Image (spheres, grey):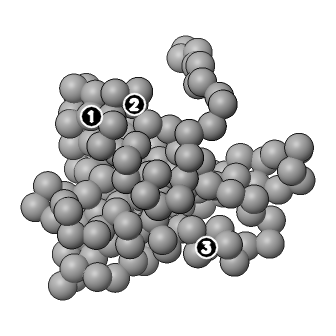
Amino acid sequence: MNIRKANLNDLDFIVKFNMNLAEETESKTLDINIVKQGVLKVLKEEVQGKYFVCEIDGTIVGQMMILYEWSDWRNGEFIWIQSVYVDKNYRNRGVFKKLFNHIKEYCDNGKNFVGLRLYVEKNNNRAKSVYSSLGMYENDYDMYEYVK
């Protein structure tokens, strides 16, 4: 199992995984062209964030995107974990754990990073259990949004 930073050659895999993620977790069908543009922006610019992929025998089987959030209270950046997806055929094999540990190490070794954050669907108890087992905990904040 190999974790590496994604590159432009991974675009189609990441788009496919993001489409699958929306369908499986939220029963949403996304516009593939918008998703492709969004993924391409991250892969090209990396200022917004980065994608990491997990490969087994040269096949991409999982992904994770990270974004950065400045915290003036801590004078450092939180890494937000998003767009996590593991191919159905490779689940329960430690792919997510390997991706998570890679990002945790990236965080621990970065001078300006203060921690990791992610959000999870309220009823996704399985995911919550996994996150807890990796040392994460539920905080005191609820998330709100405005979508234009």
> Which amino acid, mark 1?
Thr
Quadrant in which the C terminus appears: top right
**Residue at 80% across, 72% down:** 111
Dot 1: within a 10 Å radius of its alpha carbon, few (fewer than 14), some, or many (20 or more) residues?
Answer: few
The first of marks 3 and 2 along the sequence is 3
**Residue 41 at least partly seen:** no
**Residue at 82% across, 56% down:** 76
**Residue at 57% across, 68% down:** 104
**Real-space Cα distance between discs 3 and 1?**
27 Å
Which numbered disc, 1 or 2, marks the residue closer to the eye?
Answer: 2
Measured as percent of width and height from the top left, residue 58 is found at 21, 82
> Which amino acid, mark 3?
Tyr
**Residue 98 at least partly seen:** yes
Residue that mark 2 sits on:
121
Dot 3: within a 10 Å radius of its alpha carbon, few (fewer than 14), some, or many (20 or more) residues?
Answer: few
**Tag 2 secondary structure:** loop
Quadrant in which the N terminus appears: bottom left
Measured as percent of width and height from the top left, residue 22 is found at 28, 35
Indicate which disc residue 106 carries: 3
Res 94 → quadrant? bottom left
Mark 1 and mark 2 residues within 8 Å of each other at the beta carbon? yes
Res 109 → quadrant? bottom right
Measured as percent of width and height from the top left, residue 74 is found at 86, 50
The first of marks 3 and 1 along the sequence is 1
> Which amino acid, mark 2?
Glu
Q: Is residue 129 above or below residue 90?
A: above
The residue closer to the viewer here, 126 or 112, is: 126
Residue that mark 1 sits on:
25
Indicate which disc residue 118 carries: none
